[in-house]
Image: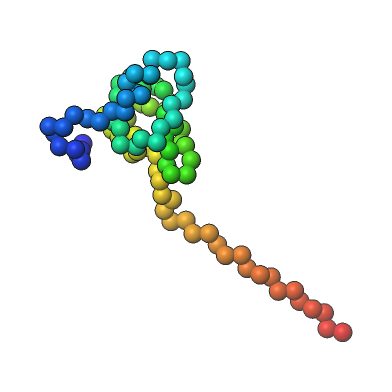
Amino acid sequence: MLNKRSHWKIPYIYNIFVTKIHGVKKVYKTHNRKTIIPNTLLSKTLSIYNGKKYLPVVIKREMIGHKAGEFAITKVLGYKPKKKRKTQVKRKKN
């Protein structure tokens, strides 16, 4: 796993995930995409903001240690809406 932060820096974990995670709350909303997912979030739902809406992500064992933003896609690639074609009305000849 390649990290952008140097190996001597402490991994960044959002404070709310450490202090308030022991509650009964089922879904945790966050705008913070750069935080590293800790062990305490295992099998809980994390709603990550992608710039438009919150995407619910259930945290699995493989996701621990990765950044939260990796699991909320921000761009839709390869989508281009089709233009509406104006239908021509055929007139009857008299």
Q: Is residue 62 visible?
A: no
Q: Using the image, determine if residue 56 lies above or below residue 50.
A: above
Residue 21: horizontal and vertical position, in percent? 38, 19
Q: Residue at x 47, y 44 (%)?
A: 52
Q: Using the image, determine if residue 2 lies above or below residue 43.
A: below
Q: Is residue 63 left or right of residue 5?
A: right
Q: How many marks?
A: 0
61 or 3, which is in the foreground?
A: 3
Q: Using the image, determine if residue 50 lies above or below residue 94.
A: above
Residue 50: horizontal and vertical position, in percent? 42, 42
Q: Quadrant of the C terminus?
A: bottom right
Q: Which of the 4 quarters of the picture holds residue 72?
A: top left
Residue 37: horizontal and vertical position, in percent? 31, 28
Q: Is residue 3 visible?
A: yes
Q: Residue at x 43, y 44 (%)?
A: 51
Q: Which of the 4 quarters of the picture holds residue 84?
A: bottom right
Q: Residue furthest bottom?
A: 94
71 or 14, which is in the foreground?
A: 14
Residue 29: horizontal and vertical position, in percent? 44, 30
- What's the image's color scheme? rainbow
46 or 29, which is in the foreground?
A: 29
Q: Quadrant of the N terminus?
A: top left
31 or 54, which is in the foreground?
A: 31
Q: Residue furthest right?
A: 94
Q: Residue at x 15, y 37 (%)?
A: 6
Q: Residue at x 30, y 36 (%)?
A: 34
Q: Is residue 89 left or right of residue 14?
A: right
Q: Is residue 67 left or right of residue 26?
A: left
